[in-house]
């Protein structure tokens, strides 16, 4: 059974091309026990093992936790806003990437200080990477390709599952069709030009 064609309402050629190309792009690197990665000023991508030193040294005011099995350490987040969103790292999962990218943006706007924001999942590899890439696409006006490569340059072992990559491709198409962003260039020849109208329901 091909789970990608079964569960995604996209043409088989789209799925096959995306799977082949994304597998080629994804790094084959061992994930360390803990690494605290600054993606841009004030925005950090990490895993469940972030420390009190990470929080205090970087003026962390908000932690966005995207896990089902990683409760916060109350001693670490005592003076920090902590929001947990219960999502699995699964190709069958749908992350609220638009909502969470908005959450990061408005957390920055509402703070009079220079806020630090942590986005993490269990290993800081797939779920949290997806959210930060979506934020860079929407609010820093990066293409998916540029945002992905930028995050990968800051955290070498990012490895987004194929379901989340499908979401990001759709998100880029949505930004282009609804908000007038520049035309997507990620996998353009194989995916976007051929299926743009289908994936955006003709809008």
Image (spheres, helix red, strand yellow):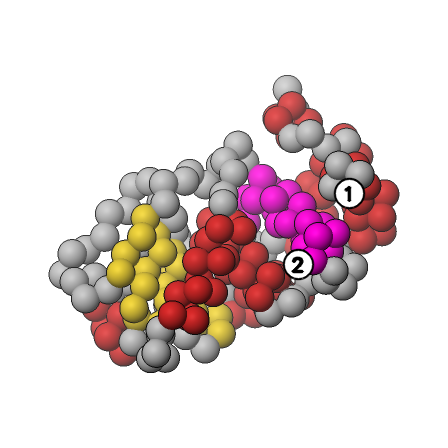
Secondary structure at badge 1 equals loop
Residue 148 in percent (x, y) is at 61, 61
Whether residue 35 is visible here, answered yes or no, is: no
Residue 155 visible from this viewpoint: yes
Along the viewing direction, whichever of 18 and 56 lies nearer the viewer: 56
* Above-or-below relation of 34 to 110: above
Q: Position of residue 149 (x, y in %)?
A: 63, 65
Count of residue discs: 2
Q: Is residue 180 left or right of residue 56?
A: right
Q: Which residues are magenta?
A: 160-179
Between the C-alphas of marks 2 and 1, the distance is 20 Å
| Picture disc at residue 144 | 2
Local crowd size for mark 1, using a 10 Å CA cut-off: few (<14), some (14–19), many (≥20): few
Q: Residues within 10 Å of mark 2 (few under 14, many from 20)?
A: many
Residue at numbered disc 1: 203
* Residue 85 versus residue 118 in the image, above or below: above
Residue 140 is left or right of residue 71, and the answer is right
Residue shown at 61%/62% (left/top)?
Answer: 137
Residue 108 occupies quadrant:
bottom left
Could you tell me which residue is drawn at 29 percent across and 76 percent down? 59
* Residue 125, x across and y down, in percent: 46, 54
């Amino acid at each position: 059974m091909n789970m990608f064609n079964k569960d995604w309402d996209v043409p088989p050629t789209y799925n096959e091309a995306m799977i082949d190309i994304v597998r080629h792009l994804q790094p084959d690197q061992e994930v360390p026990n803990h690494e605290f990665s600054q993606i841009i000023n004030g925005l950090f991508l990490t895993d469940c093992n972030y420390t009190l030193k990470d929080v205090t040294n970087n003026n962390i005011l908000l932690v966005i936790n995207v896990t089902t099995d990683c409760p916060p350490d109350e001693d670490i987040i005592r003076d920090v806003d902590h929001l947990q969103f219960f999502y699995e790292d699964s190709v069958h999962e749908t992350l609220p990437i638009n909502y969470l990218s908005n959450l990061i943006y408005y957390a920055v706007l509402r703070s009079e200080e220079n806020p630090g924001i942590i986005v993490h999942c269990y290993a800081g590899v797939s779920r949290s990477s997806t959210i930060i890439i979506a934020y860079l696409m929407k609010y820093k006006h990066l293409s998916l390709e540029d945002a992905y490569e930028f995050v990968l340059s800051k955290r070498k072992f990012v490895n987004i599952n194929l379901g989340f990559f499908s979401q990001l491709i759709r998100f880029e198409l949505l930004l282009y069709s609804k908000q007038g962003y520049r035309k997507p260039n990620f996998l353009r020849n194989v995916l976007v030009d051929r299926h743009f109208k289908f994936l955006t329901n003709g809008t």
